[in-house]
Image (cartoon, rainbow, N blue to C red):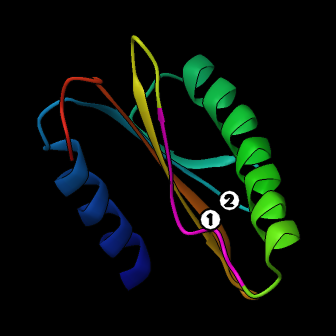
Amino acid sequence: MADVAAVDEVCKRLQSHKGVEGIIVINADGIAIRSTFDNEITVQYASLVSRFSVKARSVIKDLDDDNELKFLRLRSKKHEILIAPEFEKSKEYVLVIIQAPCCDF
């Protein structure tokens, strides 16, 4: 139960940063377990970002088996997508933050 409260607190803190439009936490199955977006946007981001982060992780491992993906930052005209995957044996989560591209974290 303490983990849930800690996750909620982190999400609130991140959401308060200037330019942050929303936050999504995705589990190992690509399902959003926390989101500040409506359901349609949440499902779209969860599906696409989870597949993208798995592919990016694979690229890093293929290039250097001793290396590991820690963070992705994608920037477009409309948004900046910050992706922090957590790949551990017991848990696998992806934190996604969507923010306005003019603002730095």
Residue 72, magenta (yes or no): yes
**Is 102 placed above or below 71 here?**
above
**Is 23 placed above or below 58 here?**
above
| Whole-number angstrom distance, CA of label 1 to CA of label 2 | 5 Å
Question: For the residue marked with disc 2, what is the amino acid?
Answer: Asn
Q: Residue at x 69, y 80 (%)?
A: 67
Report whether residue 29 is seen: no
Secondary element at image label 2? loop
**Spot occupied by residue 2 in the image (x, y as percentages of width and height):** 36, 83
> Mark 1 sits on what residue?
93
Is 38 in front, or is 47? 47
Q: Residue furthest right?
A: 62
Pointer 2: residues within 10 angstroms few (<14), some, or many (20+)?
some
In the rendering, which numbered label is found on residue 18? none
User: Residue 85 appears in which quarter of the rendering?
Assistant: bottom right
Image check: 22 left or right of 20?
Answer: right
Which residues are drawn in magenta? 67-74
> Mark 2 sits on what residue?
27
**Spot occupied by residue 77 in the image (x, y as percentages of width and height):** 40, 11
Q: Are marks 1 and 2 in contact (CB under 8 Å)?
A: yes
Q: Residue furthest top?
A: 77
